[in-house]
Image (spheres, rainbow, N blue to C red):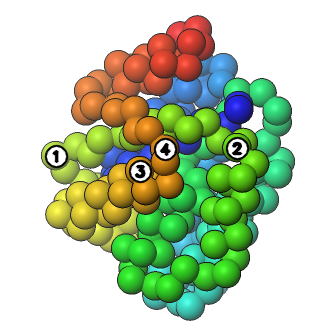
Amino acid sequence: MTFHILTGAPGAGKSVILRGLERAGLAVVEEAATDVIAWEQARGCAEPWAEPGFIDAILELQQSRERRAGEGLTVFDRSPVCTLALSRFQERADSPALERAIGRLLDEGRYHREVFFVEGLDFITPTAARRIDLEGARRFAGKHRRCYEDLGFTLIPVAPAPAEQRVETVLRHLGAPG
């Protein structure tokens, strides 16, 4: 298993950690939701997360990025399990495509069963794609935690700390040089 997952609350610092892992020489894959939101907003949809096809659009981009990933050690900023958490956070029914993706993820075992769970900070910085308050981000993080645990993943906490320290926590666990 060479695919590792970095997950956690919106605004917890996952992207910063991902940049640090990339600088350390690891292959990384960006999360898909922000890009789906940016694309749809550029096309004139102010709130793409409210659209019926939003979850499947994220899933499709995630799967496309997964197919293009190499065979070596790769860290993904989110996974289809995160998309499942988002679907449930938004109180949507799980789409057939999402159910198939989760089944495939579990059956194929491409993702390591230990997941880096980036714990939230005491603040959140709103962006065009991140329009959630701190309490909502904490609830969303709890939904992520439950989805991963319910599917049998073990969460490796990445506690709030300076960015370099958080990156080192992940590198050390991966056995990768820092």
Q: Reading the chain from its start, which is encountered first: label 3 or label 1?
A: 1
**The N terminus lies in which quarter of the figure?**
top right
Q: CA distance from mark 3 to mark 1?
A: 24 Å
Number of other residues with Cα within 10 Å of mark 4, as a class: few under 14, some 14 to 19, many 20 or more: some
Q: Amino acid at mark 2?
A: Gly
Q: Reading the chain from its start, which is encountered first: label 1 or label 4?
A: 1
Q: Is label 2 in contact with label 4 (beta carbons under 8 Å)?
A: no
Q: CA distance from mark 1 to mark 4?
A: 26 Å
Does dot 1 land on a helix, a strand or a loop? loop
Number of other residues with Cα within 10 Å of mark 3, as a class: few under 14, some 14 to 19, many 20 or more: few
Q: CA distance from mark 2 to mark 3?
A: 16 Å
* Residue at the disc numbered 3: 149
160 or 128: nearer the viewer: 160
> Residue shown at 51%/35% (left/top)?
114
* Residue at the disc numbered 4: 153
Q: Amino acid at mark 1?
A: Asp
> Residue shown at 50%/85% (left/top)?
93
- Circle 3 or circle 1, nearest the eye: 3
- Circle 2 or circle 1, nearest the eye: 2
* Residue at the disc numbered 1: 122
The picture quadrant where one finds residue 154 is top left
